Image (spheres, helix red, strand yellow):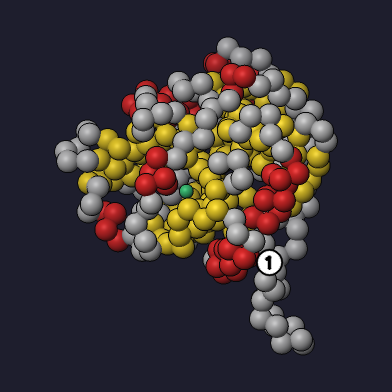
Amino acid sequence: MPGIVSSVAYVRLGAPDLDVQEKFLLDFGLVKVQRDEQRLYMRGISNEPFIHVTERGESGVIAVGYNVNPSVSMESLSQRFDAPVENITEPGGGQRIVLHDPNGMRVELVQGREQVQELPRRDPLRGKDGVSKDRGPSRIEKLVHTAYMTTRLAETIAWYQESFGFLSTDELYIGEPGNTLGRFVRTDCGEDPVYHHVLFIMRGAKDGLHHASFEVERVDEIFTGGDYLHELKYDHVRGIGRHALGSQIFDYWMSPFNVMHEHWSSTEKMNVHSSFNEIKIGSGMVHDSGEAPPERFVKQASPILSAKVATA
Ligand SMILES: [Fe+2]
């Protein structure tokens, strides 16, 4: 039976200045849905009503939202997790159940959000003007995964896998198996192919969000959108490169409020039958392309604000 969660839906961040945040997100490649005094909602070109929310306040991460498999009843989840079903008053509506993971991260399980019209895809045919490609922001499809730093690695991995049925994809260890650095987990959609991971949980000195990753329409967008962000002097952290695990082309950018956002594209998928691999650091990773990660990439953890903020 497929897992409870089919995909990640959105991140909910905190930032003290919504003007600055909006400018960054537009330049990064998201599309504005709605904004008021307190909240900014952004979407991609996919049919999800929003994939990124910013609430005015402290910088950090407030919550991560996950789409509940349509075949799973919210009432059954309510009983299982002993949490009420709430009606969502944000764009797209629907229902949600709010949980907290072992690190205090707020997890919003959502179902019944009204889908919106997809935005037009880029036409691959060269126009009469002879211009190959406009410069400008990347075109982002949707949120595809997040990564967490945690001081409670085993507990956090177990919580996500037992709660949502996430499957193990790859685990990284140092020295001997069991000395785990982190594990990539993916959604269980049965025979249907899914990406390499919906969540990467890694051991760290503190708890926090390492990054949120956004799939671009096609791999070119990582380069052209990256050029655009460089021109505007945004804070580049790492890339462009390719992770061997998952065949992932990446480029990491720091928001003005110290939350790392990734432009991402991958051609590799797996399903319920794909095997779990334990990989020694320094062996499987040697195939990564691009520069080595800088120290601040390795130590990155945006603070978890979940316990402090009441959301709509
Ligand atoms: Fe990533």
Question: What residue lies at 55% left-to-right and 41% top-to-bottom?
Answer: 258
- Residue 283 drawn at (x, y percent): 22, 53
Q: From this viewpoint, which residue is outermost toward the left?
A: 176
What's under tag 1, amino acid-wise?
Answer: Gly
- Residue 6 drawn at (x, y percent): 56, 39
The answer to whether residue 220 is visible is yes
138 sits left or right of 304 in the view: right
In which quadrant of the rendered view does residue 203 lie? Answer: top left
Residue that carries the numbered disc 1 in the rendered image: 136
Above or below, comparing residue 305 to residue 112 in the picture: above
- Residue 294 drawn at (x, y percent): 38, 51
- Residue 68 drawn at (x, y percent): 60, 33
Q: What kind of element bears circle 1?
A: loop
In which quadrant of the rendered view does residue 55 lie? Answer: top right
Question: What residue lies at 79% left-to-right and 45% top-to-bottom?
Answer: 33
Q: From this viewpoint, which residue is outermost toward the front?
A: 233
